[in-house]
Image (cartoon, rainbow, N blue to C red):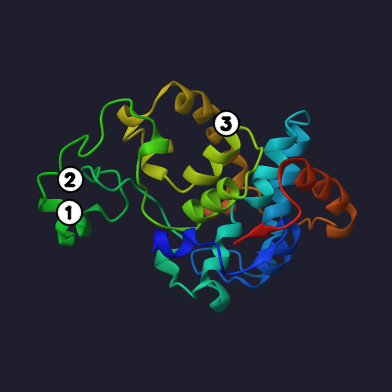
Amino acid sequence: MREEYKKLDKAEMGIWECCELHNEVVDDSDPDLDEPQIQHLLQSAEAIRKDYPEEDWLHLTALIHDLGKILVLPKFGGLPQWAVVGDTFPVGCAFDDSNVHHKYFKENPDFNNPNYNTKNGVYSEGCGLDNVLMSWGHDDYMYMVAKENGTTLPSAGSFIIRYHSFYPLHKHGAYTQLMNEEDKENMKWLKIFNKYDLYSKSKVLVDVEEVKPYYESLIAKYFPAKLNW
Ligand SMILES: [Fe+2]
Ligand SMILES: [Fe+2]
């Protein structure tokens, strides 16, 4: 799967263009289907912007964190929901009990593979999450797209994009032995971001045209005009 998506040969488009395309995505795990998806992105981003006005990279990170959900669209492979949304977790080491639906991991052949079922598995203590293979989903896809297209977002931005669905880590404190010092620093920002992700949905709609120039300026600062997806 990763090899296939690493080719980044599905489309060529800018970040804002993708925000608009993202409106076509229906996420079954999202309780709030009445509003277009771009409202979730902009509501998160605007809420963070209000509280952290200096951290422009964080505003942009909030805007783009869920763009990877375009994987459900036919042009991007039309992946099933389970392969795109939901919690993520490392593979190659034991599945922590805090993983949602943990009991079903017993059906996974890795569960009984002695190379993969110890606490650190194929990894070493403090190796850094960058070196850990995560389960596939919209997080890892968007992280890959940002990185391969040479984003200049600070590492905390990439960290938020890659691990925002990694609930065993940021909610339950599992797998922390794999983190390095930089991860621990970045974790502070992920925790801040999370407060704005799920709970930012409000009845007040953001005026898209009004805020668009601001986000366009951030996109120009941190991304090329066109990206390969
Ligand atoms: Fe997400
Ligand atoms: Fe989100």
> Which kind of residue does numbered mark 3 sit on?
Trp
- Which circle, 2 or 3, is nearer the viewer? 2
The residue tagged with tag 3: helix, strand or loop?
helix
Residue 7, how many percent across, how many down? 50, 62
Q: Quadrant of the N terminus?
A: bottom left
Q: Identify which residue, 194 or 125, lies in the foreground.
A: 125
- Which circle, 1 or 3, is nearer the viewer? 1
Q: Residue at x 49, y 74 (%)?
A: 77
**Mark 2 burial class by Cα count in 10 Å: few <14, some 14-19, many 20+:** some
Mark 2 and mark 3 lie on one chain; the one further toward the N terminus is 2
Label 1 beta carbon within 8 A of ligand 1: no
Question: Residue 110 has which mark?
Answer: 1
Mark 1 and mark 3 lie on one chain; the one further toward the N terminus is 1
> Which kind of residue does numbered mark 1 sit on?
Asp
138 lies above or below 122: below
Reading the image, the residue beneath label 3 is 189
Relative to 116, 200 lies left or right? right
Q: Are marks 1 and 3 in contact (CB under 8 Å)?
A: no
Q: Are marks 1 and 2 in contact (CB under 8 Å)?
A: yes
Q: Quadrant of the C terminus?
A: bottom right
User: Mark 1 to mark 2: distance in Å?
Assistant: 6 Å
Q: Residue at x 74, y 32 (%)?
A: 51
Answer with the quarter of the image where residue 52 lies. Answer: top right
Question: Residue 116 has which mark?
Answer: 2
